[in-house]
Image (cartoon, helix red, strand yellow):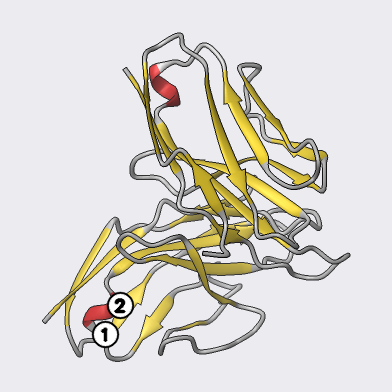
Amino acid sequence: DTGVSQDPRHKITKRGQNVTFRCDPISEHNRLYWYRQTLGQGPEFLTYFQNEAQLEKSRLLSDRFSAERPKGSFSTLEIQRTEQGDSAMYLCASSLATSGSYNEQFFGPGTRLTVL
Amino acid sequence: AQRVTQPEKLLSVFKGAPVELKCNYSYSGSPELFWYVQYSRQRLQLLLRHISRESIKGFTADLNKGETSFHLKKPFAQEEDSAMYYCALKRPGGSYIPTFGRGTSLIVHP
């Protein structure tokens, strides 16, 4: 499968624990996005990278959340001291961005986080 | 602030019936709108963009700036159209990051 991959697909954790998710984008894609989707809602933007630079962070991304893309390839999203409200599907997407023109995002299967 | 509203959580129709999935938006600038689809156990994917004016899988959507709407339509629904449909509005700026509506679940009965 040459699409966007995410690991793990499911994560169950206890409140207060730290969790880390990984996203591997389509290999030639320079942009990588993270979204969060709660039950009954559409995806909400969290942050995105162009290569290794984190260009934008949503206000949804509290201090407990951190994302990295150290070599401009895969990315990790860490949530520290998880809360029950963090339970959601975390989606990753990637795109090949060229200046000023539309670039379609391709989504991964998501990581479903359940915080007990 | 921009907003996308999909008033129906669920739309249930019979095969062969027309389908209209409603989407309204609020945005002060020139909007760019999209429809995304997620079939059961599959990934979220782009269905169509208003700028491209394409018909994809028999679906069309026309941007109506006067009514601030971007409804998705198909004249004859098929069972394989059953899915979650999300309307989305491009956020300001050049990054093409969408603001999604909450989605409408379309069920097409045989």
Q: Which mark is residue B77?
A: 1
Q: Nearer the viewer, residue B38 or A32?
A: A32
Q: Secondary structure at mark 1?
A: loop
Q: Which amino acid type corresponds to the residue marked 2 in the rendered image?
A: Asp
Task: Give the chain of mark 2.
Answer: B
Question: In this image, B8 relative to A42: left or right?
Answer: left
Please report the residue visible at 64 percent of the width from the left and 34 percent of the height from the top: A76
Residue pushed farthest front?
Answer: A1
Can you tell which of label 2 and label 1 is closer to the viewer?
A: 2
Q: Are marks 2 and 1 in contact (CB under 8 Å)?
A: yes
Q: Nearer the viewer, residue B64 or A5?
A: A5
Which quadrant of the view contains residue B84?
Answer: bottom left
Q: Which mark is residue B81?
A: 2
Q: Position of residue A41 (x, y in %)?
A: 40, 45
Quick check: B69 above or below A108?
below
Which quadrant of the view contains residue B8?
Answer: bottom left
Residue pushed farthest left?
Answer: B110
Question: In this image, B93 relative to A33: left or right?
Answer: right
Please report the residue visible at 79 percent of the width from the left and 45 percent of the height from the top: A72
Q: Which amino acid type corresponds to the residue marked 1 in the rendered image?
A: Ala
Q: Position of residue A96 (x, y in %)?
A: 75, 64
All told, the count of numbered labels is 2
Q: Position of residue B21 (x, y in %)?
A: 36, 71
Quick check: A37 above or below B85?
above
Please report the residue visible at 79 percent of the width from the left and 35 percent of the height from the top: A70
Q: Secondary structure at mark 2?
A: helix
Q: How would you rate the neighbour count of disc 2 (Cα within 10 Å): few for under 14, some for 14-19, many for 20 or more?
A: some
Quick check: B66 above or below A26?
below
Disc 2/disc 1 C-alpha distance (Å): 7 Å
